[in-house]
Amino acid sequence: MSSRKTKWGMSEIQPQKPLQTLGNTNKDLYPNIYIILAPLLTMPPASATAESNGLRKKNKHEVEELPDVGNNLLTGVVTIDHPELAAARGVISGQPRMTWPSWSNQQHGVGVIDLVSVQAHGHANGGYFLGRYPPTTAVFVFSVVQAEISLSLHSWKRPTKMPAVKGDGMRGLAVFISDIRNCEYSQAEIKRINKELANIRSKFKGDKTLDGYQKKKYVCKLLFIFLLGHDIDFGHMEAVNLLSSNKYTEKQIGYLFISVLISASNELMKLVIQAIKNDLVSRNPVHVNLSLQCVANLGSRDMAEGLGTEIPKLLISGDTIDAVKQSAALTLLRLLRTSPDLINMGEWTSRVIHLLNDQHMGVVTSATSLIEALVKKNPEEYKSCVSLAVSRLSRIVTSSYTDLQDYTYYFVPAPWLSVKLLRLLQNYPPPEDPAVRTRLTECLETILNKAQEPPKSKKVQHSNAKNAVLFEAINLIIHMDSDPNLLVRACNQLGQFLQHRETNLRYLALESMCLLATSEFSHEAVKKHQETVITALKTERDVSVRQRAVDLLYAMCDRTNAEEIVGEMLDYLETADYSIREEMVLKVAILAEKYAVDYTWYVDVILNLIRIAGDYVSEEVWYRVIQIVINRDDVQGYAAKTVFEALQAPACHENMVKVGGYILGEFGNLIAGDPRSSPMVQYQLLHSKYHLCGPSTRGLLLSTYIKFINLFPEIKGQIQEVLRSDNNLRNSDVELQQRSIEYLQLSSTTSADVLATVFEEMPPFPERESSILAKLKKKKPARVSENSEVKEHKLPQAQMANNVDSAPPPPQVGELFTAQVTTPGSGGGSTDLLGLGTSPPLVTVGGPTTTSSSALLVDVFDAMAPPTANGLDANGLSLGAEENCKKFISKNNGVLFENDLLQIGIKSEYRQNLGRIGVFYGNKTSFQFTGFSVDYSTPGNLSSNILFYLNVNVKPVGTFVEGGAQVQQLFNIECIEEFNDAPLIHIKFLYSGAEQKINLKLPVALNKFIEPVEMDSSTFFQRWKFLNTPEQEAQRIFKARLSTDPEQIKARLLGSSLSVLEGVDPNEQNFVSSGILHTRNQQIGCLVRLEPNLQAQMYRLTVRASKTDVATIFCDLLEIQF
Amino acid sequence: MIKFLLIVNRQGQLRLRKYFEEKVVTHGEQREIIRQCLSAVDKQNFLVEFKDFTVVYKKYGNLYFIAGITSNENELAVLELMHHMVETLDKYFDRVSEIDILYSLDRVHMVIDEMVVNGYILETSQPRILVPLQLLDVARK
């Protein structure tokens, strides 16, 4: 009991003594106060008992005579002094409690007055008297002790007029809760709780004679402690005992404890399940319901096992009362969710569906939830629920609000059931049966019509309930996506909501409209609201609503309004909330790309993006603009010019420097003619930013510089200077240091021709899903896929089509550098610029190929095939093609075929399970080839093992190849699973009237998809031993055909994408290698051991791989290399 | 479906917690949800997006009713279900307050259990919801 005193006054004058109060009280105004207080105050303490008897009668009489609360009011001014109500002052009025006279029997009586209203004003911390719910819920209890009246805030509990005091009169519980609430510090609270826990624990342990009431009390305390965030690890047994009691009150508490506090894995679960079993067959439906709800709350597997057969019976039995059926339906739903395998509904299907016809609305409500879950599992079996659901819905929608009695909520008939039914129907396409379909359409129309009727109530509950049904109906309309009339009406309805004064409705309307925008029938209708949505974007106060507006603009965007929408979004981006900027940037980038007609516009948009929100422009966005610029030569000059201008800004974002550096490095030559952007100016502009940038940007700029050396030999000196500076050559960043050294070396030792070859313009990127789109999808899985994919087939195909495949983002400079560092097979520092992480330096076919530095390179050229005769071998392949193809096993680039007329070169690169192969056809003659065509095929079942297709992004090969000219094709390839064949290309053309046919195998071998792995000796042999089944191993012993020089062997192993592990094999002459084969779904480890016998010129080759057949295929491939 | 239901007071103290799915939110997430609901500026607002689900909440006097729902659940319907819950509690407690919820936690649990089971609506008819409670009150007399 709190000891805080409250002063009680009758007027503005604060009384010093209660007697004074009485004196100030106006008898006429406050008769009851007078009646109560007068005897108390005027009688001597000793006579209190006697006198109060008289008072009781009197008062009883009063109450009987004046049962009306209005006339029985007690009012006064109160100054409340309580920590939670800092100095609130106000008027209270109350009614003497029915039982109040009882206090007067005691010498130290406590009187209670139930307050009807408290109107306090002033500052209140807890705000009990100032919140929305008071004054009527305010609780006030004051006590009168002897003749001294002191009002103390005893508790906040309002003794209600209900027959029993809620809380069961558990005084100990009430005191405990009050104590906790009075704790001002959390430590005091914890102390009090620990005390109580210890108390309960000892009671449970020691006192075996606890009765039901006490157990109940302690369990309630534990519940309360649990709610405060403390773990409860005891009392479970007592709860189980309560559960098994026959007394409803104890059983109920027991179930509550079990449901809230016990986890499904508790060891007592068996006992609980047994008790539940007993209750399930109880004659008392209240007990049955308690047990069902407990199952629904816990839903463990054990329960499904033990009770899975009982519950369906309860659900469909004719004897079961409605309330039990309702619980049974939802309990089943829970068990279906947790242990679908244990619940067999097969034989009950039709009876469950017919629950939709049940006359009891409560049963229908819970059955609909169950049926929806069943439908999701097995739509076909439950198909007949559609017509029942439609007719049920129709009955509800057409009923008046008085028909459904308790199930009407603020004049809306059964809103929750309607929502459920509408939701259920969204699992099916529009009904096929025309009668059902018409009926459903009528329902939906009725709902839409009702939305236009004047509201039956001004209460927000009425409109909310109505709108809940309306939104669900619109969802169904969008889901069916078949009735243009309904769709347009839905759109108009949502349009009205866009202007609604309630924020949340605008929010929901924007969300639904997003879906409407993807329907071909309503896309145009949605576009009418563009202005409103843009206004929303600018004026909405809540960021989540603005976010929806962005989503909707994104969804409604098409070719006709792209420029405007993108423009508005860019405008908004300047002031947009930080939380949505990144996503907006992605969206703008995607829209700009998707609907760009003029790619200069696209470049402008992206550069604006970087300027406005550079920090939020993720790598994907600037990678993408570079990909597009590189793939589209019509925009390259413009891009170079624009980035050059953008870089002139005094402060520009690092991302701008990256894009600028990359683009100028590739296409700076296109603007170098203008003296204002001469090579030197370009270089100085970029270099002025160099020191402000981070290491990754610096690395990129270094690459740009070396490209400049190639493009503009005249500034070579300055650039070498920079490369040579200590700042770069001795940079603490290994990456920068390496680049500087390598570029410096490359620029000073190689000829211009080599530079030109190595730093050739980047080849076009393979077409693949926009990495930005992938990122956006990752960010918001559901929403984006709805927006983009649904739309994809309904709207005109975007010019820059976004193939949806699983390709990873294109290799990027930074990324490749790391790949290169860990790759022993890579030739030199120059390779990364060409986007070829793991391959030796490129050889441009037909171009000059002079180089000398690397033994590896020599090997590559040695292997280059001599010209072969024109003709086909037994397999239909051109002569020498098969043999030539094999040479590519250990290299990626070279000449695949050559005769007097034609030279075919290959450039290829691989990354994990993906690869691309550039095929270059060079006309060696000085005459035109006509009718030039190239077909390709994947023989046998190869097509299921690899995905092989022409990259359509590259300019297609025309039918003419001019004399001396070269055309190219780019193929993409993905390894799905292991294969041992290779795709074919069939070349046909006319040369001086004679048809020439060349059939070639493309050099695609399984080992290309291997990436080398470094490992130490113990790991190697541990894995080696692990792969010990016969299918995992392949071994060959063969005579050496090529040089057995260890360096050459090593080079060939490296060329076959394997690592060469030094110091692993105890015998130094042996070679061991390891690698991982990447296929689409699998990564297969491969280990190789090659043991040369130099005297006999023989090899023993052993390959082990974690997948059957892989070792054999791989062994075959490697054998021919040595 | 409804994933969880919380009742907290304006100070952020939990007054009732009901999870309809095991481990649906972590302790930290729950705190964050409560914080977001309590700090809403816009009085009309009743929605918060949180991770992969939506949070619907409404303030009644000193108490916030907060429900986490799956994205396929109708937000307005849940909002009104909560209001219905408050009205039902109101009817049972004759004007419900935080005190009732605090001191009669078991009853509040019962009311909710009679309305929502396993995250789905069990019953919306007020008289029917209150039947077991009235039985209990009779039994306790």
Image (tube, rainbow, N blue to C red):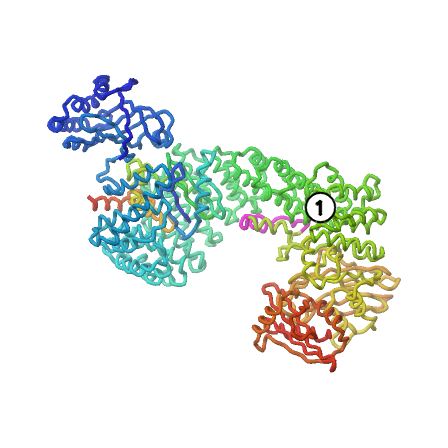
Query: Which residue is denoted by mark 1 in the rendering?
Result: A659
- Closer to the camera in the image, A446 or A221: A221
Kindly indicate the quadrant of the structure image that contains residue A830: bottom right
Q: In this view, does A623 lie to the left or right of A318?
A: right
Q: Looking at the image, which residue sits at the far bottom?
A: A1096
Amino acid carrying label 1: it is Val
Q: In this view, does A678 lie to the left or right of A14?
A: right
Q: Looking at the image, which residue sits at the far left?
A: A50
Residue B105 falls inside the magenta stretch: no
| Whether residue A499 is situated above or below residue A263 in the rendered picture | above
Query: The N terminus of chain A is located in which quarter?
Result: top left
Mark 1 neighbour class, 10 Å CA radius: few under 14, some 14 to 19, many 20 or more: many
Tell me where residue B116 appears, x and y as whole percent. Answer: 36, 47
Tell me where residue A777 appears, x and y as whole percent. Answer: 58, 50
Q: In this view, does A470 lie to the left or right of A772?
A: left
Query: What is the tally of numbered marks visible in this picture?
Result: 1
Which secondary structure lies at badge 1? helix
- Closer to the camera in the image, A696 or A186: A186
Tell me where residue A407 appears, x and y as whole percent. Answer: 34, 43
Query: The C terminus of chain A is located in which quarter?
Result: bottom right
Kindly indicate the quadrant of the structure image that contains residue A992: bottom right
Residue A933 visible: yes
Q: Residue at x 47, y 54 (%)?
A: A432
| Whether residue A976 is situated above or below residue A481 in the rendered picture | below
Tell me where residue A202 appears, x and y as whole percent. Answer: 26, 51
Kindly indicate the quadrant of the structure image that contains residue A355: bottom left
- Secondary structure mainly formed by the magenta segment: helix
Residue span colored magenta: A780-800
